[in-house]
């Protein structure tokens, strides 16, 4: 393969994905963003991001945009949906991204999941678990698929998401019993730190704001070194 190396971002059109796009560009990274529609293209291209069209639910389309002569050094995925969305990308879309990343031999795959997935189900109240159950089942499937893929990975499970500016109080912890709130921009900063931190390799983290947490008492913050 020849050409410049890129970080491949799925989910850049909104939410945490857009905040990660902002963070990566502030670090002068080369970013390629997968978009299903055209609405966000002008804004992302104005930021200096290379936009590629494709639906994460289409395995061939995902392979086509990841396996190119421009190497992908890492994939970051924030894709997913709400319980009402019908066929969602939480599992299947991420599975396609993981399969393509394996073929492309990417150095790292960062998956943004959610507190409530896997063993962190104990951190959510029963009513919240029931409401989000269908989404969380798929997110757990995606996590397990990534862990079994052989890829180097980091899984980040944010708490309840807020859209206000970053607070700088976002933390990562391996304590899966903790929950709380966190601003999307803080999740993005933590994800960008994990990208080149060896300490984050093959880890699953909960991500919360240290000032907005509840649950398991004292929380040990994970240091990325």
Image (tube, rainbow, N blue to C red):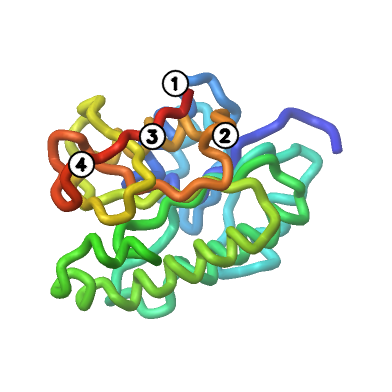
Q: Is residue 104 above or below residue 225?
A: below
How many angstroms separate mark 1 from mark 4 (CA)? 19 Å
* Neighbourhood count class around disc 4 (C-alpha, 10 Å): few under 14, some 14–19, many 20 upward: few
N-terminal of the pair, mark 2 or mark 4, is 2
Q: Where is residue 184 in the image (x, y as percent from the top left)?
A: 28, 41
How many angstroms separate mark 2 from mark 4 (CA)? 23 Å
N-terminal of the pair, mark 3 or mark 2, is 2
Viewer-side residue, 12 vs 131: 131
Extreme right residue here?
Answer: 1
Q: Is residue 28 above or below residue 184?
A: above
Viewer-side residue, 176 vs 51: 176
Q: Where is residue 106 in the image (x, y as percent from the top left)?
A: 70, 44
Q: In this view, does 193 lie above or below 111?
A: above
N-terminal of the pair, mark 3 or mark 1, is 1
* Neighbourhood count class around disc 1 (C-alpha, 10 Å): few under 14, some 14–19, many 20 upward: few
Viewer-side residue, 94 vs 205: 205
Residue that carries the numbered disc 2 in the rendered image: 31
Residue that carries the numbered disc 3 in the rendered image: 222
Q: What element carries label 3?
A: loop
Q: Where is residue 185 in the image (x, y as percent from the top left)?
A: 30, 35
Report the residue at 42% width, 66% height from top. 139
Q: Quadrant of residue 107?
A: top right
Residue that carries the numbered disc 4 in the rendered image: 163
Q: What element carries label 1?
A: helix
How many angstroms separate mark 3 from mark 4 (CA)? 24 Å
Viewer-side residue, 156 vs 91: 156
N-terminal of the pair, mark 2 or mark 1, is 1
Q: In which quarter of the image is the N terminus?
A: top right
N-terminal of the pair, mark 1 or mark 4, is 1
N-terminal of the pair, mark 3 or mark 4, is 4
In the displayed structure, does residue 176 sit left or right of residue 93?
left
């Amino acid at each position: 393969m020849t050409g410049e190396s890129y970080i491949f971002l799925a989910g850049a059109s909104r939410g945490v994905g857009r905040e990660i796009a902002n963070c990566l560009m502030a670090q002068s990274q080369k970013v390629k963003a997968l978009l299903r529609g055209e609405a966000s293209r002008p804004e992302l291209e104005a930021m200096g991001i290379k936009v590629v069209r494709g639906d994460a639910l289409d395995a061939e389309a995902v392979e086509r945009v990841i396996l190119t002569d421009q190497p992908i050094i890492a994939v970051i995925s924030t894709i997913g949906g709400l319980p009402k969305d019908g066929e969602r990308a939480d599992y299947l879309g991420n599975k396609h991204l993981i399969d393509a990343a394996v073929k492309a031999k990417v150095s790292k795959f960062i998956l943004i999941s959610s507190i409530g997935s896997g063993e962190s189900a104990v951190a959510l109240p029963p009513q919240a678990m029931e409401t989000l159950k269908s989404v969380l089942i798929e997110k757990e499937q995606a996590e397990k698929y990534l862990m079994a893929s052989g890829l180097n990975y980091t899984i980040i499970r944010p708490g309840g998401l807020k859209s206000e500016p970053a607070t700088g109080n976002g933390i990562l912890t391996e304590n899966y019993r903790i929950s709380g709130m966190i601003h999307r921009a803080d999740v993005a900063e933590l994800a960008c730190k994990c990208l080149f931190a060896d300490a984050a390799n093959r880890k699953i983290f909960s991500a919360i704001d240290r000032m907005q947490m509840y649950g398991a008492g004292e929380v040990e913050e994970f240091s990325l070194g």
